[in-house]
Amino acid sequence: MATKVPLRALSELPCDQECDTFALLSRKEESTTRDGKPYWMVTFRDATMEFTFPIWCDSPLAAVCRDEWAVGVFYKLRAVRRDTRFGPQLEIRRIREVVEQDRQDGFDPLMCLPQSRYPPEELYRELLELTRKELANESLRTFVTTILEEFRESLLTLPAARTHHHAYVGGWLEHTLSVARTCVFLADKYRQLYPDLRPPLDRDLVIAGGILHDIGKLRELRFSTITTEYSEEGALLGHLLLGRDIVREFASRVPLCPETQLRLEHLIIAHQRLPEWGSPKPPMTPEALIVHYADDLDAKFHIYYQILFTDSGDESLTSDRNILRQRLFRHLPPSSQSSSPPSR
């Protein structure tokens, strides 16, 4: 009786053991060797790991790779992981396109895409609960809830950005929920510190702005299994103006007080503060100021997290080869640390 081949996630394949796995073909590039023979450099990936390796022209897989393998298609592979001096590679024994029946074995397209550490369904539920709990203004609460409910399916997979921060499935929800929570905290803090502010700080407007500040990403970004790219309107207009457009469209169905709508539109177009970052206007209200800094802090903190998490060195400072083009401090080198207090 034949031994059943285990089914494992691509990123969990053990070395030198034949396993079945599901993977996305994310890259296929034809090239030539120094003797002029063709070969194909391919990359298979899941949500957390990728394998890049060549398919040589004399391989049994060469013809099918050349003629049939397509970037952006999911495959079921029977393969062996080999760790080489060029990095982890796959020795493919069998390969076919994923079929509907594979879902019974646990296949899900999202398993091959980078995604939030938190389940998107849970993030969405928490964002909706925050909206319903924290927004006392009934018309504004209905307005924000209507937008979230109408775009639910898209928001579950939408990244927060193309590359810079939270650039993965569920990234928009993770970032937006974090910003909204910060807005709740800051609105309460500054309402208490400045009770004589005129006009009074509008707590509901701050929270609504935190939730909707990036709603234009729905039209700015075009998300696929391979990459996240800018749509034509995203490239030409940007998510700030597209977000303002969404607010205006929904205000025709769920009317807001004219001043509330004006202030909400300003929160959206001003939340990046500087023209070089895309804002046509700087924050001109206290509410817009809070939303800007809540958003900026969350985005930059995530960038710090990514740099510290992915930089593989153990030196006291990270490399400066990152999106910030700067080094981050980790810790003092072990040789400079002493268990005894310094002498007086």
Image (tube, rainbow, N blue to C red):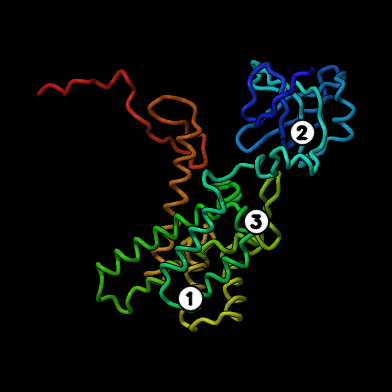
| Residue to which mark 2 is pinned | 76
Helix, strand or loop at label 3? It is strand
Task: Name which of mark 2 and mark 3 comes first in the sequence.
Answer: 2
Q: Amino acid at mark 2?
A: Lys
Q: Position of residue 263 (x, y in %)?
A: 46, 75
Q: Is residue 229 above or below residue 255?
A: above
User: What residue is rendered at 47% in x and 45% in y?
Assistant: 302
- The crowding category of the residue bearing disc 3, from other C-alpha atoms within 10 Å (few below 14, some 14 to 19, many at least 20), is many
| Residue to which mark 3 is pinned | 221
- Could you say which quadrant of the image residue 113 lies in? top right
Query: Which quadrant: the N terminus?
Result: top right
Tell me, yes or no, whether the two marked residues, 2 and 3, touch with CB atoms within 8 Å: no
User: What residue is rendered at 61% in x and 80% in y?
Assistant: 253
User: Does residue 191 appear left or right of residue 243 in this picture?
Assistant: left
Q: Amino acid at mark 3?
A: Leu
- The crowding category of the residue bearing disc 1, from other C-alpha atoms within 10 Å (few below 14, some 14 to 19, many at least 20), is many
Q: How many marks?
A: 3
In the image, which disc is placed on residue 140?
Answer: 1
User: Does residue 295 appear left or right of residue 52 in this picture?
Assistant: left
Query: Looking at the image, is mark 2 or mark 3 nearer the viewer?
Result: 2
Q: Amino acid at mark 1?
A: Leu
